[in-house]
Amino acid sequence: MIEVRNLTKRYGKARGIEDLTFTVGKGEILGFLGPNGAGKTTTMRIITGYLAATSGTVEVDGFSVFEDAMETRRKIGYLPENPPLYREMTVSSYLRFVSELKGIPKSKRKDAIGSAVEAAGIETVYNRVISNLSRGYRQRVGLAQALLGDPDVLILDEPTVGLDPRQIIEIRKLIRSLRGKHTIILSSHILPEVSMICNRVIIINNGRLVASDTPIGLSRRIKGSERIAVRVRGPRGEVVNTVRELPGVSSVSVETPDSAAGEREVLLIVETEDSQDVREALFFAMASRSWPIVEMKAVDMSLEDVFLKLTTEESLEDETEVPPGE
Amino acid sequence: MSKTWSIFKREVASYFISPMAYVMGAVFLMLSGYFFSVILLATHSASMQGVLGNMAVIFIFIAPVLTMRLLAEERKLGTDELIMTAPVSITSIVAGKYLAAVFTYLVYLAVTLIYPAILIKYGSPDMGPIYSGYLGMFLFGAGCLAVGTFSSSLTDNQMVAGIIGFGLLLFFWILGWADAIVTGPVGDTLANLSLLKRFDDFQKGIIDLSGVLYYVSFIFIFLFLAVRVIDSRRWSG
């Protein structure tokens, strides 16, 4: 549905985004993740046609956003980070204005506005002036605006930023309810949000693509990330030494015991080399010494860990690029 | 075209919902009314000639304020992200907004028709210069508003847009004095570019085609520049 190829945008000498390539399939919800200033908004603005790219191509449903801008804009609903609202207008006159801009024929206008209002849940404020609405409702009006005319593609820039927790949950629920009907690109710097809503995550940092995978695949993908938490009843020092000597174990760290049984128990985080499975070896090693394993589980790296790991690696590379004179 | 109409309608509503249109209208009409009364009392002649000239000068101060909001505010509030990503051409956007300003100006001008109406009721004015004078006044004002629209495209700060617009209009006013300073073809050419100089002919009752063409091309050039400025912003970010 959306094909971004070798997209580059430079602001003067400063780098906006650099050689970004990704595709979004029909009906997919793509999460766009990155620290502030990574280039998320820039990428979204290029896809919507608000900005021009320095080089590269973007196609929406086979149409180039640069050459057939009017065609692609018709297919895209866009909610910028700050909802683009005219404060002096009422919600109803605002939505009528947007539906005219989008070229929705007069006969269908009423239905289109009705279904967008319903989807965004703003029936109760329909006749109110926008400047009197709360932040959450403004965001919803912005979303209704993006939904108008039932566009194939929705581009939502930080749709939950600045909302209170209850509003965040509602907006997320709303976005999830759109799954399948629309192809959605959603940007965020909140990781659980993305893993909750999206089928696929793209992480960008400093304008470059760092990773692209499913939320689960992403946390699995990091090399050496296979980690096991083991709680063993036995003498601490000896247990640690025994585990450390097992083949395939790269490192062992001891967590402080937290329970009343803490005196007799050791909680270990075992990291393995090349994703080897050491659980069996671990079991027999402990069993042969009569140290019962009371708990053993695989620890997935959270998306937070992955994100931090990926983005800090990237910035370390960047630092080495800086010439010594600076 | 229908998109231009949508933009136009929203913009006119925005003018008349806010105090802007009323305040500027009140100032314009108060000063025009003052000039009309004073000139009429002093000359006792049923003519609009001096009055329209003074109205034109007043409008040089009104036009930048009336137009400074048009494009600058969209950028300030981020609503430009809506209209620039909707299937609407920049030309339609600029045209719709400019026409809304022109419409507001026409409302003001319509109110000033009271003055010739008073002249007709109590005297017998020569109607020719009044017709041509009003045509000239309309073209002149529309030119000022085009300059204001262009200034508004340059920045997201309304004050800055207003000041730039005012500066440009003052420049196109004082260009009319160029032939007094520089003699010969250079001075004449510069003076011919002046917004007010052209207006003098219309006031005297002369509808000169070159004058009409001057104003029309003046308007198109500044609106074209506004479109170019907005379009180029997509590259600079």
Image (spheres, grey):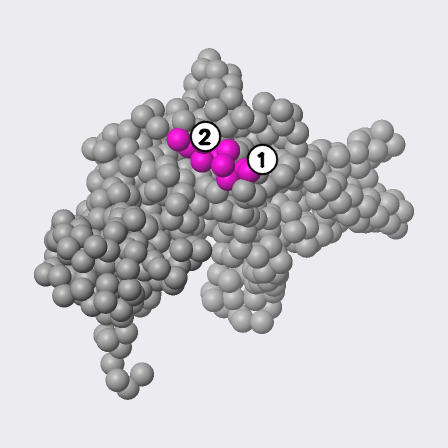
- How far across and down, in percent of the image, does residue A40 sit? 35, 51
- How far across and down, in percent of the image, does residue B33 sit? 82, 44
What secondary structure is marked by label 2? Answer: helix
**Residue reaching furthest to the bottom:** A325
For disc 2, the neighbor class at 10 Å (few under 14, some 14 to 19, many from 20) is some
**Upstream in sequence: badge 1 or badge 2:** 1
Q: Quadrant of the N terminus of chain B?
A: top left
In the image, residue B210 lies in the stretch drawn in magenta: no
Which chain is indicated by disc 1?
A
Residue B29: quadrant of the picture: top right
Residue type pointed to by label 1: Tyr
Viewer-side residue, A170 vs B184 = A170
Q: Quadrant of the C terminus of chain B?
A: bottom left
Which label number is shown at residue A174? 2
Residue A242 at least partly seen: yes
- Magenta span: predominant SS is helix
Viewer-side residue, B87 vs A159 = A159
Q: CA distance from mark 1 to mark 2?
A: 13 Å
**Residue reaching furthest to the front:** A290
Residue A73 at least partly seen: no
For disc 1, the neighbor class at 10 Å (few under 14, some 14 to 19, many from 20) is some
Which label number is shown at residue A137? 1
**Residue reaching furthest to the top:** A107
Discs 1, 2: same chain: yes
Count of numbered badges drawn on the protein: 2
In the image, residue A171 lies in the stretch drawn in magenta: yes
Residue A173 higher or lower than A264, as above or below: above
Range covered by the magenta-colored residues: A166-176
Task: Please give the name of the residue rendered at 54% of the width and 71% of the height, measured from the top-left corner.
Answer: B182
Q: Is residue B30 left or right of residue A52?
A: right
Residue type pointed to by label 2: Leu
Task: Please give the name of the residue rendered at 50% of the width and 39% of the height, measured from the top-left corner.
Answer: A168
